[in-house]
Image (tube, rainbow, N blue to C red):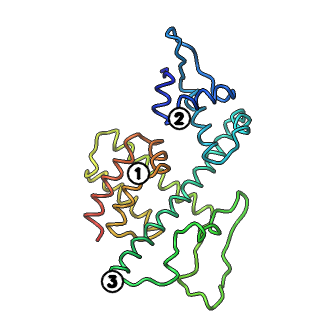
Amino acid sequence: MAYSMTDVSGMSGVSLSELSHYAELGLLSPAFRGLDEDIYYEKKELLTLQQILFCKEAGVAEEEIGSMLKEEPVEIIRVMRQHRIRILEEALRLHGLIQTLDRTVSYLQGEETIEEHELYHGFEHNTRHARLPEAGQTQHLPETLPSRESKAEKIELKSKEDFLDSQTRIDQIHLDLKQALEHGLEPGNPAVQEIIGRHLEWIKGYYTPTAEIYRDLANLYVEHRDFRNMYDGYHPRLAEFLREGMIIKASQDLS
């Protein structure tokens, strides 16, 4: 199927001037020019545009994108997987930040206590050292920490293998939700709620959410650009489908 320049701009969020700019740089050429003199793109060009956007998201300089697009598919896949891990790392940081904000609000309202070191969980400067090691490297915490640090202050870092295993699990959850959506199941359907339950258990591998936190996370999946882009990659309605299912799960299984 062919798409006009206006169509591509609408579906990708890339302006017409940007598309023209990529054409001038030789990064994105149209598939053909129609009888109406408009230019058209097909699946191959749409994939190239996606790769350009991934490169920009990953911080690749514009003058270097062209050479990356000429790489073998296996290299492009490797770069995309690395970028996916960075997005997921940011997702986990945001999860922790939401929990910190909610616990702080509860503390200020006199509903619960909060330890001093817990005030900073999730903030960027407090997580830089917790990034995944590069390929081929292994990162471990010392077996002991200085005695002045409490047990709660120790940050447990998963190995890269554990992290990737975790992402395999969440990827399968997303694929199962996509299949349920395509089969016409509603978010409240028991089969869908079973999948949402697996999603909740995955989240609990990082922190234990309250009903309010889980609902807020559901809304974040729809409203945050990076989350939205990730879910759109599975299905254009998956973010909303997951949100509805999570809100139901929060009301039924969380307090």
Amino acid type shown at disc 2: Val
Residue 77 position within the rendered picture, expressed as x and y whole percent measured from the top left: 64, 42
Indicate which disc, 3 or 1, sits on the residue closer to the N terminus.
3
Question: What is the spatial separation of the Cα atoms under label 3 and label 1, in whole angstroms?
Answer: 30 Å
* Disc 1: which residue: 223
Residue 94 relative to residue 213: left or right: right
Where residue 25 sits, quadrant-wise, is top right
Residue positioned 33% across, 79% down in the render: 109
Which secondary structure, mark 2?
Answer: loop
Amino acid type shown at disc 3: Gly
Q: Are marks 1 and 2 in contact (CB under 8 Å)?
A: no
* Disc 2: which residue: 14
Amino acid type shown at disc 1: Glu
224 versus 92 height, above or below? above
Where residue 70 sits, quadrant-wise, is top right
Residue 23 position within the rendered picture, expressed as x and y whole percent measured from the top left: 64, 26
Residue nearer the viewer, 192 or 59: 59
Residue positioned 67% across, 72% down in the render: 140
Residue 158 position within the rendered picture, expressed as x and y whole percent measured from the top left: 59, 68
Which secondary structure, mark 3?
Answer: loop
* Disc 3: which residue: 110
Question: What is the spatial separation of the Cα atoms under label 1 and label 2, in whole angstroms?
Answer: 19 Å
Indicate which disc, 2 or 3, sits on the residue closer to the N terminus.
2
Indicate which disc, 1 or 2, sits on the residue closer to the N terminus.
2
Return the residue found at the far top.
35
Q: Are marks 3 and 1 in contact (CB under 8 Å)?
A: no
